[in-house]
Image: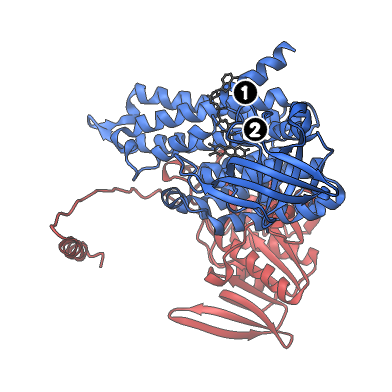
Amino acid sequence: MHTIVCIKQIIDPEIPADQFKLDASTKRQVRGGLSLVISAYDQNALEVALQLREKVGGKVTALCLGESGAMGAIKTALGMAVDEGVLVSDPPLLESDPFGVVHILAKAIQKIGVPDLVLTGCVSGDTGDKVMGPLIAEELGLPCVTFVSKVEVKDGKALVRRIVEDGYELVEAAFPLVVSIISDDSNVPRYSKLKDIMVAAKKQVPTWKTADLGLDGERVGAGAARLQMRDVSIPERDSKCEILDGETPEERAERLALRLRELKVI
Amino acid sequence: MDFELTEEQRLFQETAQQVAEKEITPIAERVDESGQFPRETIAQLGELGFMGVAVPQEYGGAGADTVCYVLALEEISRACASHGVIMSVNNSLYCEPVLRFGMEEQKRRFLAPVASGKSMGCFCLSEPGAGSDAANQQTTARREGDWYVLNGTKNFITNGNEADYAIVFATVNKALKHKGICAFAVERGTPGFTVAHLEKKLGIRGSSCAQLTFDNCRVSAENLLGKEGEGFKIALATLDGGRIGIAAQAVGIARAALEASRDYSKQRIQFGKPIAANQAIQFMLADMATEIDAARLLTLNAALLKDRGLRHTKESSMAKLYASEVAMRASIKGVQIFGGYGYMMDYPAQRFMRDAKITEIYEGTSEVQRMVIASALLS
Ligand SMILES: Cc1cc2nc3c(=O)[nH]c(=O)nc-3n(C[C@H](O)[C@H](O)[C@H](O)COP(=O)(O)OP(=O)(O)OC[C@H]3O[C@@H](n4cnc5c(N)ncnc54)[C@H](O)[C@@H]3O)c2cc1C
């Protein structure tokens, strides 16, 4: 079983709000020296892949398109004991829209060799896009199941647990397959073991550029972008503190409940 | 000096930060208040490799270097100094001497289980009458054929209540002074080895501090680390490394104090503006930050020398001395910045101050560090 997990490096969403800045011209977050992490659902996807490997064997490859610093994301994945990593990094490629990104990732996947399973996060942690899984499947001509918490193998087929409102669906699908992963108690990303980090740090990771991938120039880069971000802004947040009095805890709780209802919070 | 972190050092730091933030910070206050040893998180740290960071993988460790170790220890101590000292004693004071001075068979027996985090180790040098004057060992080791019989009392032993293995210093002949001292690896459960008493402490309350007694405790000659009479040398060499760990612990505590007071000062309004708008507060924060950076650099410098196999006695003492005093100053300023709230148990500022104090005392008081530094300067 070979699984490729597509991971994206983003600015840590946990940074204090006042450090979050937008670049007015590119409409993107300013990275500055802020700490970078693997997008949250992509981390869940890595965990799903690693659990699957523990059950059925095989290997896991982490694939990332990003700045050269995104090697850090690959190394973090390797620290979680992923077997291999590939970084695609070429500045013009980073200007691509999601369709361009998918073309790049699909070409990289083909170059690695189409695996049994491709995993992506279900939502990108910075832009909020939910398209990667389905579009990669389309590009590769593979079936796709979205919003999945767990993947198992039964009788040579994939049995995936797809989370829907108020429950889940069990979907059987043939390999090769693309699955987008949602977070769940069953796929909380593991911490790296320090001894795996020692291995990860030394592992060679190839960096591929445009020329390595045989990309269709019409489909990637800024010029090819069919989607453009026109405007983004940081919502203004206003916080107020109100203190409710009351003699007894019961009384205070009641006042709190009434006040919350008044504010239409409950 | 070159402090650009290597890839593995950066990843170590990142993992330590994550574990500290998600697993340890949330329980730090409870650990302090209850004074209970944090078994679960220590076991988790053990599984991840934090209990034998610089021990080679063939002996159950993570196989990293001292720089990785201090980076990790700073992060863990920033979250909770009790976790910091438990980790530091296990790594520096137990694993390190067994690794350096143990024979192959001893490493298999006494190192692998502890470095892998399955068991725990402690280091028994101090005695009621042998604190700063550690060579004044009263615990005796009487040779009887292939055995040594230990008798005596060890004081203030961190991890003493939980440790499965102890390194115990004892003298075969008091007249030989420090040249009579031996180091033994002693297993918990050996008849005559008892946890006699647990101390109640001002800080690092989640770690145990035990009085251990040895009453005709028979240990095999196979448990002797190094040669007879080499014990004091082993103790001093061990403390050279241990002090780097305590320096890292102190930097972690100081950082916790700085970060908490920085955040608080931005949010606490007095006279219609955040207290951080006052230069008096800003200057305290600036001094704290500057001293913390200096302390970290001294710590990394000592770690780097150790990793390069160079002598680092003086540099370890300098790092430990300076970092511990920085932790104390920074945490006192932290309480001041929190004002009355800093004095209350509901806020963490007081915990940092209580935790910081011990770093000026154990593994050699500040006075002892100055003695070590001065003797290196004057020799
Ligand atoms: C919480 C805690 C955990 C500990 N963990 C361990 C452990 O795991 N293993 C272990 O072996 N020990 C441990 N210790 C013991 C610790 O290392 C000693 O407490 C320390 O070395 C000081 O010894 P002492 O307490 O006997 O103080 P003393 O040596 O009595 O010192 C008292 C004061 O006199 C000063 N002083 C002493 N001699 C001189 C001198 N020549 N010149 C100037 N000033 C001097 C000291 O600096 C100090 O200020 C721990 C202690 C504590 C409190």
Up-down relation of residue B27 to residue B279 (above or below)? below
- Ranked by sequence position, the earlier of labels 2 and 1 is 2
Q: Residue at x 42, y 45 (%)?
A: A17
Categorize mark 2 by other alpha carbons within 10 Å: few (<14), some (14-19), many (20+).
many
Split into 4 quadrants, where in the image is the C terminus of chain B? top right
Q: Position of residue B119 (x, y in %)?
A: 67, 56
| Image coordinates for residue A59, horizontal then vertical, percent | 77, 68
Q: Circle 2 — which element?
A: helix
Give residue B138's quadrant in the image: top right
Q: Secondary structure at mark 1?
A: helix
Q: Nearer the viewer, residue B157 or B10?
A: B157
Residue, disc 1: B369
Q: Which chain is the one coloured blue?
A: B
Do circles 2 and 1 both sit on a common chain?
yes
> Rounded to the nearest whole Å, what is the CA distance between mark 2 and mark 1?
10 Å
Query: Which image quadrant shows ligand 1?
Result: top right
